[in-house]
Image (spheres, rainbow, N blue to C red):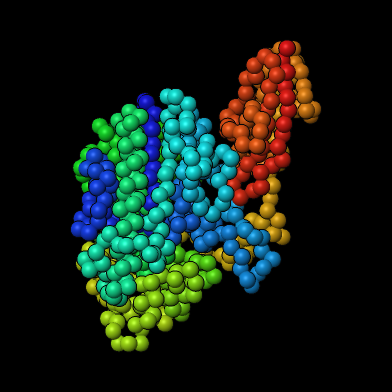
Amino acid sequence: MRKERQPNILWISLEDTSPRFGCYGDPIACTPNIDRLADGGTMYRNAYSVAGVCAPSRSAIITGMYPTSIGTHHMRTAHTNPYTPELPTPYEAILPPYVKTFTEYLRRAGYYCSNNAKTDYQFAPPLTAWDDCSHSAHWRNRDKDQPFFAVFNPIITHESGMWKDENPLNTDPDRIAMPPYLPDTPKSRQALARHYDNLMVADQAVGRLLEELEEDGLTEQTIVFLWSDHGEGLPRAKRWLYDAGIRVPMIVSWPGQIPAGQSTDRLVSLVDLAPTVLSMAGLEIPAHMQGVPFLETDLADREYVFAARDRFDESYDMVRAVRDRRYKYIRNYYPELPYLLWIPYSHQHPVLQELQRLEDTGALTPPMKLLLQPCRPTEELYDCEADPHEINNLAGEQAHAVQLSRLREAMDGWRSRYGDLGDMDEELMVRLRCPEGVKPTAVKPILVPINAQHAGIIPITDAHVEYSELTKLLLHTATQGASIAYTMEDGDIPRWKIYNGPIQLERGKTLVRARSVRIGFCDSEEARVVITIT
């Protein structure tokens, strides 16, 4: 789907949110603005993250690549292992040299790209990623008539919002139905009621953004995506590869271009977001991207989505999952481990505390005991239509041997095609990319004049130079895969542009500043020159 006019694109990115919206059929949810967005667009019922936690998931979203293929699969890469304290702190993922944030391609094509304000990509966003990445970032800060790609990240639905809160509840806990694998106690219901309250607040934020689009007369020219980075922050949901942890809401609205008031069962992975946006902007999708543009009507539907679980904070793990529209296959690479690992942050959750409190009371049902098992099966297989909570493991049943074999093969093919750095010890991976714990630094760019006299042969080495004829300026970096950010502004917070080709200089005096940047590298020393053309 390509359009001559570049559309505006608005992303509304929620945190830790499963499809608990009215438009998805939830009778408790109070989400009128999200429901209105769905009424005007298409709702995806089979959208999935590539991980059950934010940083690996967001690394896939911003690059269009699976975390397991680029080394962003552990939560988080900025991590100090107490057993190897000599490793760099923090360690930022160093990606293959050709990998960019996809927003860089949009900026090169003339888009104004803003992010308000969460990143959490497993690496610091480079200067070339955003025109503005701050709590004041907004499409309204762009030049008039410039197309925009704007991201807003309401963080109110984060799992920590289910923890103790002194505010009175708006959602009645007695109306809450807990999943069958979690204890149904007053404390549990109160925690989930708080989440419904937070979804109401997030819905209000969505409403404000839609109102601002309307105020600016941009509704008809703007594609709106609403999604969550992974599933809700309940035990056996967040951090896990069951649907509660990776199934996410996805709504896309574009008046007159995308069917309104419809839903689809088409499989979508969040790794597809980057190529989809590039496609909607009419841009070529880089060959290294591993997602597919899901709004393209002439492409075959996905057959599978894939997800991974690796280290969380202090505790290592390795689990892989593949799902089609009906079946889910999970492979546990450490079957000797219990399900509940020591992850102190997650143990603050009141529902998990209830599960552990009731463990020895005889009050837990078999589904509630699933997370308390001292070890795991090597393989898990679920019929997600008949068993949406993924409680009945079918991996050992002969009647499902064909499905098991098919999904095993799909997983092995995915791992073979894209690689899986989960097979590599994390310390070794870090040392290969950060030898001796020294984070690499990009090489300072050189600035080369192009005119009748110099013809792009001799770099500028002085702080001030003067030419008597019109001159273009070529910027070059010797760092493989690095981009160059440049500005003609002075001061500590200039607006950095992306170098796209020789810069035409005007007569008079011009300040030019440039830095080489690459994901996971330290920015280069700044090249700075004042050029006067008489």
Which of the 4 image quadrants contains residue 371? bottom left
Q: Quadrant of the C terminus?
A: top right
Name which residue lies at 30% across and 53% down: 200
Determine the residue located farthest toward the right in the rendered image: 462
Q: Is 73 on the left-hand or right-hand side of 349?
A: right
Q: Is 240 on the left-hand or right-hand side of 25?
A: right
Q: Is residue 369 above or below residue 22?
A: below
Q: Where is residue 45 in the image (x, y as percent from the top left)?
A: 26, 53
Q: Position of residue 316 (x, y in %)?
A: 52, 70
Residue 432 appears in view? no
Q: In which quarter of the image is the N terminus?
A: top left
Name which residue lies at 50% across and 49% down: 119
Name which residue lies at 50% across and 66% down: 312
Q: Position of residue 250 (x, y in %)?
A: 32, 49
Which of the 4 image quadrants contains residue 236? bottom left
Q: In this view, does 136 lie above or below 426?
A: above
Name which residue lies at 39% across and 54% down: 156
472 or 223: nearer the viewer: 223
Residue 308 appears in view? yes
474 or 414: nearer the viewer: 474
Q: Is 40 on the left-hand or right-hand side of 405?
A: left
Number of numbered tags placed on the structure image: 0
Q: Where is residue 433 in the image (x, y as percent from the top left)?
A: 64, 56
